[in-house]
Image: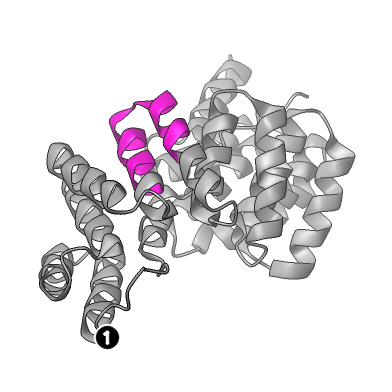
Amino acid sequence: MKIATGRFALPLALLLAASALACSHAAPLPAQAVRLNRDGAAALAAGDLATAEARIAVALEYNPRFVEAWVNLGLIELRRGNFAVARKHLLHARDLNTDLPAPHHALGLLADKQGHLAEAERHYRAALRVDPGFGAARANLARRLFERGALEEAREQFLRLTEVAPETIEGWLGLVEAHVRLGRLADADEVLVRARQRFGEHPGVVLLEARQMLRREAFAEAEGTLDALTRDTDRAIASAAWAWIGVARLGQGNAEGAVAAAREALLLDEANPVARYAMDAARQLRR
């Protein structure tokens, strides 16, 4: 049985705040400005945009050339959907200092959000030319390459991400996904073993382990592995677990069970492509 692999989706929202990383400046910034910008970035990550804007605006009163504060101000407008204003702030940040990666990366996030995918890729590459160790830009570049089917280059970028940001799981999961799509299942297994050693029972690792079981037609074992994830508080994780349980039940010829699992997945994420695959395949099986 051929198993649909679904889509790889890096949690882009988790990378928004990465643009707020502190970088060096020609002159020391006032400590109060640094604190306000840091606290504003925390409010932005928490979704409290009004508080974030207030804090960052005051940081810019201390120093109107504070690049990271302008980046964060742009990201606030990006979250609000005010793309023109966001672009204005981010271009200003870039023009203040083209040798910082954060403005280039944030412009990539904006282009990504607007669906200007080639432009987004260019901005991510620009950030990496400034700083090859800027993990957020490398993660998003790898994701863009993966999504447009440039799998070998995506694999290379995910591999580099495991080196520059080994403490984050995105590079490891992306590397597994790239190996799978390239048909290198033994390599995928090897990376999964390393990810398990580093991250333990992380839901992303468990999901990929279960998918490897499905590819080997160990359907009951995969369903048992996925069961605990259906109760995860992250709706995306729970939806994915239910969707792949649907695929596992399909492999066992259980069409009714597959439909039930797919329904649970779609209640949590109505756009889940694996759940829709399982639902359609189960309906065909019942005919």
Q: Is residue 60 left or right of residue 244?
A: left
Looking at the picture, how far across and down is residue 75, in whole percent? 25, 53
Looking at the picture, how far across and down is residue 237, in whole percent? 51, 54
Name, please, the residue furthest toward the front: 26
Q: Is residue 207 left or right of residue 144?
A: right
Q: Which of these two is toward me, 192 or 99? A: 99
Residue 41 among magenta residues:
no
Label 1 environment density (alpha carbons within 10 Å; few <14, some 14–19, many ≥20):
few
Image: magenta residue range: 105-123
Snapshot colouring? one colour
In the rendered image, the quadrant that contains the C terminus is: top right
Q: Is residue 253 visible?
A: no
Looking at the picture, how far across and down is residue 217, in whole percent? 82, 36
In the rendered image, the quadrant that contains the N terminus is: top right
Work out whether 83 lies above or below 210. Answer: above
Q: Disc 1 marks which residue?
A: 31
Q: Is residue 78 left or right of residue 131?
A: left
Helix, strand or loop: magenta stretch = helix
Work out whether 56 lies above or below 190. Answer: below
Looking at the picture, how far across and down is residue 73, in whole percent? 19, 58
Q: Residue at x 54, y 23 (%)?
A: 148
Secondary structure under tag 1 reads helix
Work out whether 188 lies above or below 274. Answer: below
Location of residue 162 by image quarter: bottom right
Q: Is residue 129 visible?
A: yes
Q: Residue at x 29, y 69 (%)?
A: 41
Q: Which of these two is toward me, 171 or 118? A: 118
Badge 1 amino acid: Ala
